[in-house]
Amino acid sequence: MEIKEIVAATRNTKKLAELERILKGSGVRLLGLDAFPGCPEVEETGSTFEENARLKASAVAGYTGRYALADDSGLEVDALNGAPGVYSARYAGAEPDDKRNLAKLLEELKGVPPDKRTARFHAVIALAAPGGRIVGTFDGTVEGAIGEAPKGESGFGYDPVFYPRGHGRTFAQMAPGEKDSMSHRARALALLSGFLKKER
């Protein structure tokens, strides 16, 4: 089974660009959902990242008749008992809004000392076969802490407040390649890439 083309279950252009950068050299061509304008939105009804990734990958593979990958990822803050978690994209309301999500997170953490602001980014990627059957899931995390104010212009989501462990800059202050070398999504995609190479 050689997989030459995969549909990524996202319309987020920044996320698609990140997926393409990390999978470069894997021999797989990545398509975004913009290539399939009729593909319906998949409701994320799962209670875990893995459940949501499986739902999205299966639905997109079923609709497009091609291999599909989906990731569900988010931020888990220890002082907030793991929130925002699976609700990371919609933390401040039903519609995804990075600025409002960041503002809410920083408000929730107001007064929390630096040593109690530990957090991690967690990503699960699911790969589905053309009929919708899940053929594998791949997990990645990166530990770090939440700063007190956004810093940096790169990245997206919570990147401007997330300091990966051992680094004095946020993900948003790093060049894309530097973030890719350690991100949660990169770690999950490295496992996926290894799986794809074994399947050749």
Image (spheres, rainbow, N blue to C red):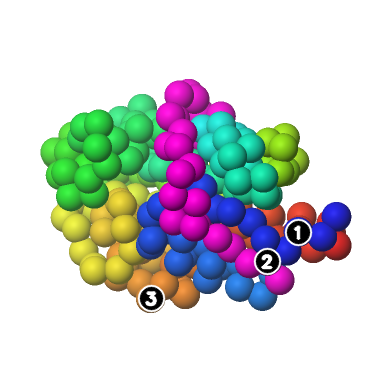
Helix, strand or loop under label 1: loop
Res. 35 visible in picture: yes
Residue at which label 1 appears: 3
Residue at which label 3 appears: 175
Res. 187 visible in picture: no
Q: Residue at x 45, y 24 (%)?
A: 45
**Looking at the picture, how far across and down is residue 57, in whole percent?**
59, 40
**Looking at the picture, how far across and down is residue 34, in whole percent?**
44, 56
Disc 3 crowd, CA 10 A, few/some/many (<14, 14-19, 20+): few
Q: Where does the magenta region start and end?
A: 27-51
User: Disc 1, disc 2: CB below 8 Å?
Assistant: yes
Picture layout, residue 195 above or below residue 22: above
Q: Residue at x 26, y 59 (%)?
A: 160
Q: Is residue 45 located in the magenta-colored stretch of the structure?
A: yes
Disc 1 residue type (three-letter): Ile
Residue at which label 2 appears: 28
3 or 1: mark nearer the eye: 1
Q: Quadrant of residue 27?
A: bottom right
